[in-house]
Amino acid sequence: MTSPLLAKVSVAVLLFTVLVHLQLEAQTQAKKSAAQGEEVFGRQIKARVDKLLKQMTVEEKIGQMMQYFQLTPDTTAAEERARKGQVGSYLFVTDPAAINRLQRAAVDGSRLKIPLIFGFDVIHGWCTIFPVPIAMAASWDPKLVEQAQTVAAKEARAAGIQWTFAPMVDIARDARWGRIVEGAGEDPFLGSAIAQAQVRGFQGTRIGEPERLIATVKHFAAYGAAEGGRDYDATYVPDVLLWNVYFPPYKAAIDAGAGSVMSAYQDLNDVPATGNTFLLQDVLRKMWKFDGLVVSDAASVFNLTTHGFARDANDAAYRALKAGVDMEMAFPELNIPANPQMGLKEPIIMPGLHTYDVALQSLLKSGKITEADLDARVRPLLTAKMKLGLFDNPYIDEARVESVLAAPAHRELARTAAQRSMLLLKNEGDLLPLSKSTRSIAVIGTLADSAKDILGSWVFAPAKLEQTVTVLQGIMNKAPSASVTFVRGAQIKRPFPSPVEPPQPPLPDQSQAELQQEIDAAVAAAKQADIAIVVLGERQNMSGEAASRSSLQLPGEQERMLKAVAAVGKPVVVLLLSGRPLDITWASANVPAILQCWYPGSEGGNAVADVLFGDSNPGAKLPFTWPRSAGQAPLYYAHNLTQEPETKKNFKSRYWDDSSFPLYPFGYGLSYSRFEFSNLRLDRTEISVGGQIRASIDVQNVSDRAGDEVVQLYTHQRAGSASRPVRELKGFERITLSPGEKRTVTFTLGRKELEFWSPQTKEWVVEPEQFDIWIGGDSKASAHAEFRIVRTD
Ligand code: BGC
């Protein structure tokens, strides 16, 4: 006989099962109808686009394929172009009133009333500036990255932008390359996770969500492998690196739904990316099934002639069109008068750099291209505009813009993001955090007081310098009763202006005598103070586009100043503002505490002070390997081992003048807490090809301070059809642990994590071999286990 209790339990189990079933059914239904909705929406848009295409003249189609820079406030000529249907998009218009004005010209003034799409490089914020992308990647916190780009999208969209030229997902393994600051560093696994988070943040779950933008994954492809780290220079990247290292973040961004792709400036294996059919057709559209829009980089179609690839502008247009560039990012004629006060010694007189509108008509007439070729390029452009809702809702509410930009939640998130990207490189004797009752502080270094520099590159008019918190201000906010002495110290400046930022008044020069005076003042301030905080690094225009360097040394006489201050004998904290690893070999050996602050954005100074005084506990980790000097470039942790490592006695291949080890390894970063890893275990020791394995580890906070650890998993395949890197990141999770707390972190490895593109078979393979696993707090993790993949067929 069944007991009443058992009967009740059985009924409960039955009910529970039915409920779960119903819920699952409901979820499946919801997903199905969402998918059906999307499909209907897609079909409707396709029908609208087809109908519109039939009404368009050849001139109007070509007009849609043009995107022009609009760099001056006078929009008269640009409006005229819009009325004539000779342009599909403008970039770099930041004034909402100008955007509405131009849109009105297109919508009310042009024959087919096709709206313009406005693009801009919303890279790390619009008005509220978040830390630069490399800093956001250092947070190892994709959720945070997504939230930040959601805010950036919201602000930019309110102001009239619908399309951002981000994320830049180029892998960078050479810190001389200035644009390392714009990406997520050297690693494809971390880079893919950050790329996807950015796309989700900008776009939401689908193109056309309110308050979102279309994301552009750039620069396709392998732009970060520039020879010698020189920006725009040619890249030579073998297939094995393209597939295993450079392509994955682009693919990840496209899988996350990125609506557009930007073709890169440079030659890839001798074929310029903007005319590269292998990249833009075979890989992007055929293999990856990308159906969004491809935009060229600025004037990169025109520049196909410079490469010695296209014969002339006509040929350039032909090659870019055939390769699959839908929209040409072009320059109109420029005539900007000289303005020495603003650093513009000569006028900028530049002929227009554009080809599609000049060449496509005659290419059509000569039969080299067909109208179907044009339609194939115009279709994604019109589709994007329709998905965004621009045909139904082309204008913005100018009165609403300021209130969106002023949302306090945006500033709060910017502060959290900056805190979470602060990276503690050294903290000897637990010098940090400082006590809030510190009586006197010397703050030394010109960067400490610069609102412009703390924001980083890609920051333009919408950001408000007067609302930016500098390091100096942040420290004074945090320790109001301390006496703070500021000394500007050594001047830092580029020897010539950056070509990619608006003209600005030149910084004053500093004579040797003035420099000595500043150093003396810094020494005197340090003598008087309990602690010296020395802020060093690069100005924002020394890092970014067209900001490559041949050396990684601290620019100017900053190191001389640091040495003089350190010689005083007071405790010294170095704060680094930079977008690349700098040569800080001397500081790392001689200064007790070093905090990498990056360019932390609008709330940067407050966040720096939060970390300095312990209101926030640093937890970021390096997204690149920190070299000792430029001479080590390219330097990355996932290298192959072609002989015994440097730690072994018979090691031969090394520099005679330096170590071949980095200064700090990939994944490295300290915390005010201490963590211990124990009990690494696998749920099995053998899996079949295509199977899964779970690895778990216990992580304990063994300090009396709550803090974050980024738990990182690395694998190594011991043998196979190709040599494999010594370690590869295949899992990570940033966790917060209270004092004493212990938590188990589990990672699952499957096909995606265990496969690689084999140069022998020329395809993705999972090979039946022996594998190592390490889990820990950086790429030197020591907790180890191993497993085997076996063939079961
Ligand atoms: C850069 C791109 C950028 C474009 C528009 C180019 O010089 O390489 O990354 O999106 O300008 O500003």
Image: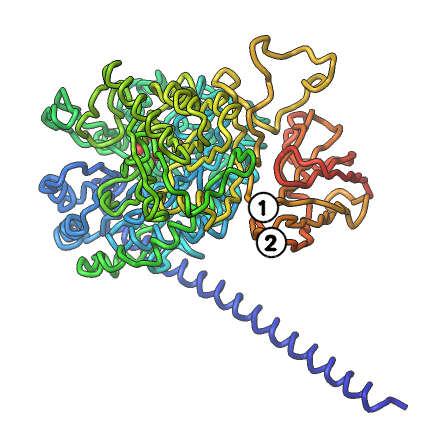
Corner quadrant of residue 5: bottom right
Residue at 66% across / 38% down in the picture?
714
Q: Nearer the viewer, residue 301 or 675?
A: 675
Q: Is residue 692 visible?
A: no
Q: Is residue 87 left or right of residue 742?
A: left
Q: Secondary structure at mark 1?
A: loop
* Percent position of residue 739, x then y: 61, 54
Disc 2 residue crowd, few under 14, some 14–19, many 20+, Cα 10 Å: many
Residue at 23% across / 15% down in the picture?
511
Whether residues under marks 2 and 1 lie with C-beta atoms below 8 angstroms apart, the answer is: yes
Q: Is residue 333 visible?
A: yes
Q: Is residue 655 above or below residue 22?
A: above
Q: Is mark 1 within 8 Å of ligand 1?
A: no
Question: Which residue lies under the disc numbered 1?
Answer: 673
Residue at 40% across / 44% down in the picture?
609
Residue at 33% across / 26% down in the picture?
524
